[in-house]
Amino acid sequence: MASQNPFSAHPTIPSDHDIFVCIFQRGAADGLNALVPYSDADYYLHRPNISVPAPGMLNGGIYLDDDYALHPALQALKPIYDGGDLALVHATGVPHGSRSHFSAQGLIERGVTDKSGPDTGWLGRHLALTAPASDSAFRIVSISGNVPVALSGSSEPLAISNLGDFGFDQGIIDLGYPQVLADLFRSPVPFFGPAGAALNAIEELQAAELSLITPDNGAVYPNTPLGNKLAQTGQLIKSNLPVEVVCLDSDGWDHHESLPNYINLSLTELAEAIAAFYTDMGSGMQRISLLVYTEFGRRVAQNGSFGVDHGTASLAYLIGGGVNGGQVISDWPGLAVGNLEMGEDLRITTDLRSILTELLDMRLGGSDSAVVFPGFSGPISVGAFLP
């Protein structure tokens, strides 16, 4: 694990609370080519033209153990895995049964299996039960331009597309308009709450001088959408802003055709962006937990366009100093037709809510699982995190 140039954890954040960074892979990411079950011969029968060869073969996967290999495009994550700070959870998901992106994203972000559950998000419910470490507008941030469903129910999460564009132009500042707006909107008018919060956030961000905070430890973020979002996340964490949660979106995972080409691009962006963030944070990763997850996986068999259609189980990534890493966590269900969900999908054998409950309990200060995941009966630990 990187150890140079550590930063001090924000003193307002309790020592049993990690900073949580959550990346949602929008579009249903395929887990079978990302983490290749090369010891399962049925994988190659189902994907004769789009599979990743076994380790040691031409263009083969990166050896992890005698059952699993990383896609070659995830090479940048291998040192993190070897250092014990990356765990991979295969055949995971929430058993909501939907193959609709819109419905499935809503259900998994709400942490429920059907529409009868609460409308708020799993992370929002947790945060609503957690005493805030500060009154900063930057306690809960979404660098995606909108508040994700997972954060709904929390107290005033802040949605920003780009931190560099959040605020007033210098000309506007010189003319005194921010003070005029402050005087207007901080009066008891209908817009008092959101307008006042926005003005406070702008003032906090200006005082933080994020433009002066540059990557440490030789980290180089890729100039990609996710790379830019994680670079901004790194600036927030290393600033004096007491950020507790940052949510990001990673788009473009709906690979219905030409899976080998498109997933190579998507996985390269994911791995290089995360590796740069990990390097930048250095020993600060001891107080950071990073989760990557998706709404559902892809079919086991390739389709006629050399892609894969909507499926069930997929892959989750857990990264941080508190992760019990260097392992693949999976009760592998097998890819023989008789073992597949509905005869065509990878079956969920590790409920994602088990992972999330353990994350909340072990790294994010604890929570009431009955409230955060109503109707979920466990298990509540799979050995993914360290105390």
Image (spheres, grey):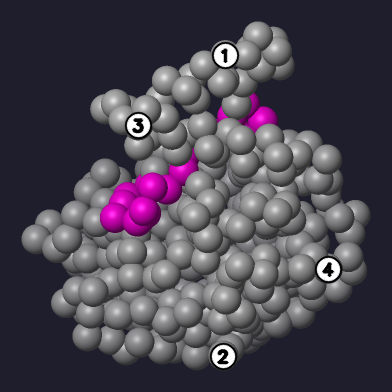
Q: Residues within 10 Å of mark 3 (few under 14, many from 20)?
A: some
Label 4, secondary structure: give it: loop
- Mark 4 vs mark 1, foreground winner is 1
Q: Using the image, determine if residue 153 lies above or below residue 232.
A: below
For residue 387, which numbered disc appears in the image? 2
Observer-nearest of 110 and 294 = 110
Residue at x 51% of width, y 47% of height: 137
Front-lying residue, 72 or 124: 124
The residue carrying mark 1 is 177
**Please, what is the three-letter code of the amino acid marked with disc 1?**
Tyr
Precedes in sequence: disc 3 or disc 4: 4
Which quadrant would the N terminus be assigned to in this image?
bottom right
Write down the residue under mark 3.
192
Q: Sequence-wise, which precedes: disc 4 or disc 2?
A: 4
**Residue 210 image-quadrant placement:** top right
Helix, strand or loop under label 1: helix
Q: Position of residue 268 (x, y in %)?
A: 67, 50
Distance between mark 3 and mark 1 Cα atoms: 17 Å
Q: Is residue 326 magenta?
A: no
**Spatial separation of the CA atoms under disc 1 and disc 2:** 50 Å
